Amino acid sequence: MKRCFITGFITGTALALAVSYVLRPAPVVSPTESSAVSAQTTVSSSKAAFLPPAKGSQVDDGAVQTAPDYDTSLLTRHHFEKLGWELAAQSFDAVLAEWKKLKDVNSRLALLRGAFEQIGASRTPQQALELVARLSSASDREQAFRTLLPNWNQSVGIDWDAAGESPSAAMMVGMYLLHGKDSPGPLAIAQMARQFLRGKERASLLGEAAAKLARTDPARAYDLGAELAGDHQMIFMRKLAEGWAGKDADAAWNWASSVPDESIRAELQARVAVTVGRGNPQKSLERLAALPETDPRRAAAIHEIVQEWARRDTSAAMAWAEQLPTQPEREAAQKGIRTAMPVGIGAMIHMDDQQAVVGELMPGGAASRSGILKAGDRILAVSDSSGNWIRAQDLPLQELVNHIRGEPQTAVSMRIQPADGSPVRVVTITREQTLARPM
């Protein structure tokens, strides 16, 4: 199991860990016409996987008796997925009637998976949401949303990892439907948020729906968050400001500037400025000039703007940061740049068998130019700021990387076991600001 960190290194594309919240029907055993196939043989869990039971097996009240080579629990689950599909094709009342008869939790979930596979393939999103609402428990509704999700999640790209979020399946379905080509509209999504979501997710989806509605009906869009208060109200208003600014920055700015409460107004103006800054950083500065120089939201917005910019074009972001009018703003920008593009040696470091190993070197980076560090070399120890040696295996990977990173034009020493088997040696490399260049 490898865990990787970048010590002042950027690749041409972002690396992301994809986390799936979609629990589609599990792979199932597919018997042949003449004999039982080993339970290790599986087929896709798509609709084509709803196959009849094998010859020689009998289905009686949901229990499957079959040859010893079969995985009985797998075939039982397959039976109820198939049954759910068939009943949903008749009516949802038939699904609920069968569901109420079942006592086993796994059988109930399998029935719902099969039913909502059929519903997702044959009904409109609005019809599907109405059927989800008929389920009595939150866990059953979440299972239904997980099953429905694959029908809509390809229509729009949302990077949940980049957003730092781990949403529920209901939240993901709401976002995909709101921004997808088959959207039932922002008002329908707002109703979905009220019906199926709670807390921050409800406020967030209401804000997203309001941002879309604001393009045609700003007053009604603002009213979508009327029931919210406190932190949830602020989440709603931030989402509204950001989403609206992405389509009509001037209208969003005028709305934000008209909010009576001074603190909320400044927060919304900062969110609009950040959104504008993703495409035009200089224009965002003009927006931020409306905030007092001492307002911390001004520096925070600059930090966010330049951080995203530095990932695309570090040199341009650094030049922009240098001409900012105040020292707090310049410092905020510098922190944003180094958060996105750390100062280091230009090498990927990962753990392998509890040892830190040098991975890919950045072409033209400090480590690559030095010629003294190679991919596959093992880092045995790193020197701290006082020159003391710290064993690499005594440090978590992130902490080791933090020791290797530092300020520009400072040196870091490492004790290395070369990949070619030559004797252990000490290498010293001068840290540099890593740079992302526009493609």
Image (tube, rainbow, N blue to C red):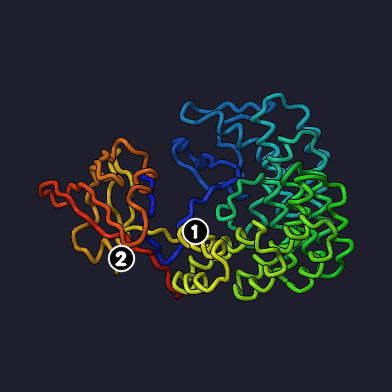
Q: Residues within 10 Å of mark 2 (few under 14, many from 20)?
A: many
* Residue matched to label 2: 365
Q: Secondary structure at mark 2?
A: loop
Residue 70 on image: x %, y %: 50, 31
Mark 1 or 2: the one toward you:
1
Figure check: 128 above or below 38: below
Q: Nearer the viewer, residue 372 or 158?
A: 372
Residue 292 on image: x %, y %: 70, 63
Figure check: 299 above or below 322: above
The residues bearing labels 1 and 2 have C-alpha atoms spaced at a distance of 21 Å
Position of 237 compared to 374: left or right?
Answer: right
Q: Nearer the viewer, residue 419 or 83?
A: 419
Position of 434 compared to 50: left or right?
Answer: left
Q: Which mark is residue 335?
A: 1
Q: Residues within 10 Å of mark 1 (few under 14, many from 20)?
A: some
Q: Residue at x 62, y 44 (%)?
A: 50
Q: Nearer the viewer, residue 94 or 259?
A: 259
Q: N-terminal of the two: label 1 or label 2?
A: 1
Question: Exactly how many numbered labels are in the figure?
Answer: 2
Q: Residue at x 41, y 58 (%)?
A: 342
Residue 58 on image: x %, y %: 61, 29
Residue 281 position by quadrant: bottom right
Q: Secondary structure at mark 1?
A: helix
Q: Residue at x 71, y 46 (%)?
A: 170
Q: Which mark is residue 434?
A: none
User: Of the residues shown, which amino acid type is indicated by label 2?
Assistant: Gly
Quarter containing the N terminus: top left
